[in-house]
Image: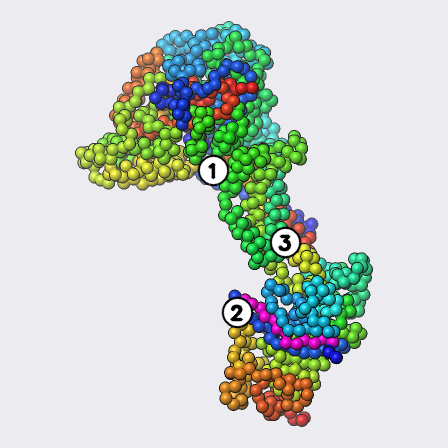
Amino acid sequence: MFKYRKRVFAATAAVALAAGLAACGGSSDGSSNPGNSEPTSDAKGGDLLYYLYTPIEHLDPQRVYVGRDITNLSRTVYRTLVSFPISNDPDTANTPVADLATDTGTSTEGGKVWSFTVKDGVKWEDGQPVTCEDFKYGASRAFATDVITGGPNYILSYLDIPTDKSTGLPAYTGPYTNKGSQYFDKAVTCDGNTITYHFNKPWPDFPLAIAGLHMMDPYRKDKDQGDKSNYQIFSNGPYKLDGTWNKNKGGTLVRNDNYDASTDSPELRKALPDSIEFQIGLTPENQYDRLVADTDPNAITGTSVPPAYYSQIEGPVADRSVLVDSPYVYYLVPNFRSAVMKDPAVRKALAVATNSDAYNVALGGDKAGAPAESIVSPAVVGYKANDAFSGSNSGDPDAAKQILEDAGVSMPVPVKFTYPTSDTADKWAAALKETWDKAGFDVTLDGLGDTYYTVIQKPDKDSDVMWGGWGADWPSAITVTAPLFDSRPNLTAASDGQDYGAYDSDEFNKLVDEAQNASDLDAQTAALQQADEQLGQDYAYIPLSITKFYMVYGSKVTNYTTTPSSNGYPDLGAIGVES
Amino acid sequence: MFAYVIRRLFIGAILLLVMSLVTFVLFFASPVDPGRYACGKNCSPAQIKQTNKALGYDKPVIEQWTDFLRGVVVGREYPDDPELRAAAPQLVTECPAPCLGYSVVNTSTVNAEIKEAFPISLSLALAALLMWVSGGVLFGVIAAVRKGTIIDRGIVALSLVFYAFPAFFIGIFLLKFVAIKWELVPPPTYTPIAEGGIGLWLQGLLLPGLTLALLYMAGYVRMTRAFVLESMTEDYIRTARAKGLKSRRVLVKHSMRAALTPLVTLVGLDFAGLMGGAIITETVFNYNGLGKLAVEANQTYDLPTIIGLVLLLGTFVIIANIIVDVLYAVIDPRVRVG
Amino acid sequence: MSSFLSVRDLKVHFPTVDGIVKATDGLSFDLERGETLGIVGESGSGKSVSSSAILGLHRKTSAVVSGEILLEGTDLLKISDEDMRRRRGKEVAMIFQDPLSAMHPYYTVGNQIGEAYRVHHDVSKKAARARAVEMLDRVGIPQPDRRVDDYPHQFSGGMRQRAMIAMGLINNPSLLIADEPTTALDVTVQAQILDLLQDLQREFESAVIIITHDLGVVAEMADDVLVMYAGRCVEYGTTKEILTHPEMPYTWGLLSSVPDVLGDTSAQLVPIPGNPPSLLSPPPGCMFHPRCAHRDKVPGDLCRTVLPDLVPGTRTEGHLKRCHLTDPDAVYEREVLPEIAPDLVEER
């Protein structure tokens, strides 16, 4: 569970809510406005309750990396320079608007330099103004890699700071030990209320990145106690933490008196409830027992309905449910070092024989997942179904067998399929094996426990096919295909990094460079689309499933919505509650 | 007796020392790299190394172990890096002796974590103990006295049924139907006595305590029944009856006193085990006790917490053993000599 | 006028899944106050089961007890459970063998003796304790006021037996049953205990049933002897008669296992071959026949097929025996005695 949570949950990509993809689950008279609930009311007041199962790992803006937590904090306490607006239209939802900054920023030097001006009148919860220096201090914290752990680390490679050859880390060591501060002071500069970031390469999607993550958030130096501040919330948004956060129980957000709504926009935060309580620890089953019984009519959850409860979501309960795409995609990778998978025909035959419909049935059916046709989620800017994987999703063993025969491969082809074992995983692994075996493969299932990612990262693994899950950090494929298939940052003598299949293609790497060096978003998007095509031609991965979020909310919850900008989770910027 | 207890405590301390070392060694013998999991996405090997440093896993195992032992004896300061502590004193967390460690994962000293979780597990274990011992002994004795009748068979059969149920089944059933669907009691939440008084505390403990009690009671019913029946065949029971004692007095004074002695050992050890946390019951009822803490520590590769809990549970078992032995001497005069 | 204790056709049967175990099958005897009856037999012969029946110790759920046990004219098998309980320990008391297991290990000796007193007398714990000290003193425990607070395991075997006797006699019972009171003790202590029992019997004028496998004990204590084998009485008579003119080969066997009873120091110890029969499926005919060395002296297959009745012996009135031999006295004199006590034969 924990193992892939980091990978799968640590993502902020938006979810496309095209009418065909999302619909109110199970409800026959479902709303014509998918993802939205009735009644809608912008009345303020009431106390909202948010169920969580496992503890939140980080509330520190520079450390938070879970999609649900990022959107919850964005809409309530941590404003960013620019933010994604509440919208079900992917184009709108993927276009940042000004938040703490006066506009959406200016870039110069071909996207290598970005400047933003902090609004006047934006304040911290203690009434002090949010300043440029606060932003600079926030950005500096990620460099303290032995204190501020677990967060997004993009700025370590983007900011124009030399690398210390002896450690392989930036020469600047963060605000605590403060070595190499001269480099940082040059890379991030303040001129009055204008902050300027200097990068070592173009970052055309920088606004998307800072709207999608909190890594560039401002931070008050006098409030910083390193790891001790992990569960501290020092707000500049409409709410503030009442008392302290208890890791195991949660906490309650109440209105922040020093928040001035005139500096904000209802496009970003309606801030309807008077308070929002996060209650940690209820198991998914317990949450849904309560939601079905409407024990807490003011409750919402970030947890999907467990498949065992699908049959209980009917009648009036179904009217309180939504079924939407999540930003997460499951996929398979062939091991390019394996003797059998080196042959492109074998990889193609495996892809053709893959029954992703059966995979989704094993996951729990259409309430749990839908077949994916690219490793990139449809919610990401410039999504295109990959030609190599479009069409039928139920696998074609006969065609696959033909491919193997035509290529003169001797059958059966022995294949070892490695995956992280669980009751559900064992089911889908068996389902995948069925069509593969029919196509002329001889599949050995290799379900691993805790050691799964350790094993598949090893360069000398003997797996032929492996399983993975991923979500974009911000709505750009540069946070999907590049980190997963660019051989240069991934492949070392000791580890394959996140490129489990050891895919190593000069053509692909060149397209990543092209995307990274693009000075505008359109050029970048075009290069990334080409890069995904390249991956498809090489059968570097086989997409399996876009997971679904299937969630129920209490009867007194109003304006319920899950938007692309809230990563498919309930959007706290919009949701209200009858008081 | 005093010297005996001191000797046992000494042996226990050595045992704990060995347990801590074994836990350290096993943790690092696992192929899983905890730094990789805590680091997040897109981490370079250098960043993973830094994360391990933040977690305190960068030093050799034996050094980590001796640091840990020093912490237990004289206390420690975190973060572990003296340079960082000197440069940024605001980061320092004091962990006074006996310091069981600092969990970066939980942003808390292990002592503080245990201090928060312990009363919850203790309350739960006490509530369960009370219910299962009283119920187990009562039904066990009834079954023994009514041996062979329909009452006996009913009790034995029912206890077998509960024995066969998995813990989560009883817990989920009680929570889902008794609390949420039928609303017979409010969904249980733990309320410390200091916050809600005895009433709310007990109300919160009712269902989770009952869940555990039903599980344990099954065994205790069967054991009590067996022990009482066995003691009924003892010569001294015949003597007691030959004196003309009423059968109730024979049962209570003579038979049960002897029959329940072996139960003391079981109660002591079961209680110590429960003190270490009832993992499933705590998870089902969202009780943030030691069991849930252990599960989370295990899932997040949180060594300091794991070590702290291993030692705590070890201490419980060692102390429970000593208490049981002392109790035995109190109960059975034959053990008192020596 | 009937006897003080009159047992008639006493049967104690235990129904089991495999069949009925006839532990006692048709036992009859009489006993007067001040007299002592010895019941002799190997273990498993039904001695203890019979005496437990007199105390009403068998549970109705496990045993079927029938016949008559008349104690001063009252049939103990007909009175209510509560009535029986009131008599138990007061009118009829029992001293058990192996007092280490017969006393509760968790309670002091004084507590257990005092409890026997308090259950029949409405007195304080203190008074009961004083009475216990008195009784311990009477049975010869030194420093009784201190030892009263000891636990059974702190007593020696002989002291425990004395304590047991103190417990049995604390309510002046009119009938005392002593079940193997000396078995676990060494010879000198054995003699002391037997002397003590005799003294006390005289003092309290009780009727005593002494159960033993040891004819030596019987010789010293008993006025009458009842020999039991496989749940039945096989020989009954005065002690003198039985010791001098036993007429049942089983009794001969018992004598040969304790030959010095006969007063012959050169006597040979000859154990009875074989084991007692199963009470679940006893052999047909005389139940002793599989172990009997004299069965061939009886014509026909009588010993193997017909259970002999309990009939008067050849010499004296009141001597009863259960045997097909027509001239048992002669056989005993001629064949048995020379083997077990040659010196005695010469004397005669």
Residue drawn at point x = 51 percent, y = 30 percent: A293
Q: Is residue A148 left or right of residue A379?
A: right
Residue drawn at point x = 48 percent, y = 41 percent: B26
Span colored in magenta: C4-16
Q: Do discs 1 and 3 share a chain? A: yes
Dot 2 crowding, Cα within 10 Å, few <14, some 14–19, many 20+: few
Where does label 3 land, which residue? B260
Alpha carbon of mark 3 to alpha carbon of mark 2: how far? Answer: 34 Å
Q: Do discs 1 and 2 share a chain? A: no
Task: Read off the chain for label 2.
Answer: C
Q: Between B96 and A260, which is closer to the camera in this rendering?
A: A260
Task: Read off the chain for label 3.
Answer: B
Residue drawn at point x = 38 percent, y = 36 percent: A425
Q: Between A179 and B198, which is closer to the camera in this rendering?
A: B198
Where does label 1 land, which residue? B28
Three-letter amino acid code at the position of disc 2? Gly
- Secondary structure category for the residue under label 2: strand
Residue drawn at point x = 60 percent, y = 38 percent: B206
- The image quadrant that residue A296 belongs to is top right
Where does label 2 land, which residue? C19
Task: Read off the chain for label 1.
Answer: B
Can residue B163 be found in the magenta stretch?
Answer: no
